[in-house]
Amino acid sequence: MDIDLSPEYTEFRAEMREWIEANVPAGLKELANWGWQPVAGGRRGGGRLQAMADPIFHTWEERLADAKLICATWPPEFGGRGWDAVRFAVFNEELRRQGVPAVRRGMGESLVGPAIIVHGTPEQKAHFLPRIVSGQDVYCQGYSEPDHGSDLGAVETRGVVDGDEIVIYGQKVWTSGAQQANMIFVLCRTNPDVPKHRGLSYVLVPFSPENGVTVRPLRQMSGAAEFCEDFFDGARAPLFNVIGGLNNGWAPAMTTLGFERGGNATTAHLGFEQEFWDLVGVARKNGKAEDPLIRQRLAWAYTHVELMRFAGLRLLASLAGGREPGPEASVSKLFWSEYHKRFGELAIDVVGPDAMVRPDGEGYATDDWQDVFLSSRAGTIYSGTSQIQKNIIGERALGLPKEPQRDERTA
């Protein structure tokens, strides 16, 4: 899509298009299908991980870093360019247009960095933020627990102050990207004697066996093991690594969640758009495009991708006008996750009987469309379940009464 909000952004688009064309290394486009919609818990990211180890990709990474096009939305004093959401969206569109990848610092860029920028001390910002920009620190998330997936305020992982350190005991689960991480941001309970949200701390913890952390992969029904569970047996971090202050972790935790659920709302449609047209290509090739029911469902999918696009445009217009986003984060997350689950079902029907047969390969191999079907279902669970998102929208955006609490005494 083209965003034509003002001559200023039109000029910016032309500038970014020219820069990309001049700096893309030969062979980068061919390393992977960079435009596929990534899915947590799926296998499709494996090809990208291999491509990201290639010297061609490292050349691209260096050129982006030199131009401060990594973490570009961060303020210039922290290594970014201070881009607004409109510029960020335009840049990502131009990368997609030319079939090349953005270079992101994962959760460090999108989740931890914003929490540090908003709640960290000057010393914490000076220490942690450059390490994220350079890729020296790679983060995973320590929020969910076996019995407290969506009730974040009820976490039981303990943080005990020992001199100038905090010592972590407990378990986290559904940790994305744990295999690549050397740091984890942990929400832990440091004061058990106050109401649940008030006794939590947000701690940046070195993530390694040497620091008392054990990581176990969790196999999903897609055959992938992208999620993990983590056990903390005396893992240590300096009190310097507590963001927002001891027992004040709820504020940075909520900052992180706001970016997790809605940080890409302005560009969310881009990957889904390519995925849709790829499926249309399959339907045309195998004759399913002539089936009226399949055509109807493809039309449904197309309208939903377009709705994502227009919702992104509306959000961009609001941001360009200086208005901070409200419930759009939960609306966006609920919309795309429920859409993608149904799209996965459509993909299997388009492929037809062949979708029932797994390809040859190591372990529980799946092809691309089987992977979409199996892994897309996780989207309605992670980053806050669909039920939680509906509660947030109903109670905080629409002002509806809160959901009645279950009485344990009569259960």
Image (spheres, grey):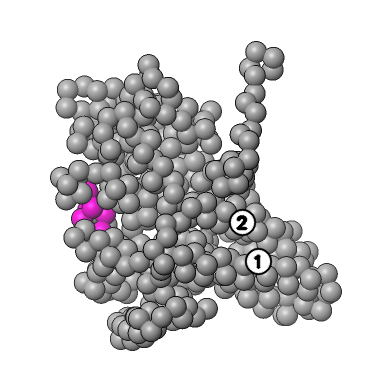
| Whether label 2 touches label 1, CB < 8 Å | yes
Can you give x and y, in whole percent of width and height, for residue 154 in the image? 47, 27
Please say whether residue 160 is visible from this viewpoint: yes
Can you give x and y, in whole percent of width and height, for residue 205 in the image? 29, 37
Can you give x and y, in whole percent of width and height, for residue 160 in the image? 29, 22
**Disc 2 to disc 1, how far (Cα)?**
9 Å
Main SS, magenta region, reads: helix
Residue 130 part of the magenta segment: yes
203 or 237, nearer to the observer: 203
Read off the magenta span: 127-134
Tag 2: amino acid: Phe
Please say whether residue 370 is visible from this viewpoint: no
Tag 1: amino acid: His
Identified at 16% across, 50% down, the residue is 126
Q: What residue is pinned by disc 1?
A: 304
Can you say whether 127 is above or below 409 in the image? below
Other residues around mark 1 within 10 Å, as few (<14) / some (14–19) / many (≥20): many
For label 1, the SS is helix
Query: Which of the labelled discs sits on residue 335, or is there none?
Result: 2
